[in-house]
Image: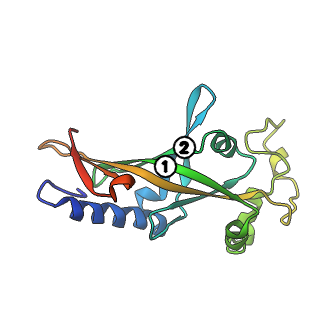
Amino acid sequence: MLFSKAESLEEIWQAVKHELHRGALEVKHPFHWVNLGTVSGDFPSVRTVVLRKVSEELHFFVYTDYRSKKCSDLKNNSYAALHFYHPKKQVQIRIKAKSKLHFRDELAKELWKKIPNHRRSEYTGAHAPGTPISNSLDGSTERDLENHFFTVLKLEPLEIDVLQLRKEGHLRVLFAKDKDWEGTWLMP
């Protein structure tokens, strides 16, 4: 369990923030892999991404290819959702966020320098992600590492909804940025 009804809202907030930071720092932490939801035409679109960093301000950072569908979705509608689930602690965290794309700007250039050479090819393909190809080898052609599409998604949370699953009865708390992250108990 991440929290119980015995903790104060402030203690719960600190535990939530700590766990989210761990997700970015620890590869084996369940929060390292996060579901990212965007609005894609008439349908929502959800995919799993890697949480690369959580800042002190609680901004979430994800890396992607600028040509990906998630980037075009976010250019059309900058609102996104993040979904985390920790199976051992039986806690779900849903986040409503506003996104900003960093492509070929100072932040992207700074972080690109930190990408290991063997991982850079993920952002340099001749074809955009999701492009139909004739066979599995078509996507593995020689790549130009200087002509890349590396993009940093910065997701700034607006609301953080935390659901603690428990046999004795679930607990749910909402933290909102417009209320300085002061928590509110919700009916689960």
Q: Are marks 2 and 1 in contact (CB under 8 Å)?
A: yes
Residue 27 visible here: no
Q: Is 5 left or right of 151, judged from the image as shown? A: left
The quadrant in which the C terminus is found is top left
Total residue callouts: 2
Location of residue 80 in the rendering, given as x and y in whole percent from the top left corner: 53, 44
Task: Residue 184 in the image: state x and y as whole percent.
Answer: 24, 49
User: What residue do we see at 75% from left, 47% from top?
Assistant: 67
In the image, 14 versus 179, the foreground residue is: 179
In this rendering, position of residue 181 left or right of residue 37 = left
Query: For mark 2, does the 10 Å Cα neighbourhood hold few (<14), some (14 to 19), or many (20 or more) residues?
Result: many
Whichever of callouts 2 and 1 sits on the residue coming sooner in the sequence is 2
Q: Nearer the viewer, residue 93 or 29?
A: 93
The answer to whether 92 appears left or right of 8 in the picture is right
The amino acid on which the numbered mark 1 sits, given as a three-letter code, is: Ala
Element at badge 1? strand
| Figure check: 39 above or below 18 | above
Question: What amino acid is at disc 2?
Answer: Tyr
Residue 51 x/y as whole percent: 52, 59
Please identify the residue farthest to the top as the structure is shown. 42
Q: Identify the mark at residue 97; answer none if there is no mark.
A: 1
Classify mark 2: helix, strand or loop: strand
Write the residue at 49% across / 49% down: 97
Residue at the image position 16 percent from the left and 55 percent from the top: 4
Can residue 173 be seen here? The reply is yes
Please tell me the numbered disc located at residue 79: 2
- In the rendered image, the quadrant that contains the N terminus is bottom left
Q: Residue at x 39, y 55 (%)?
A: 177
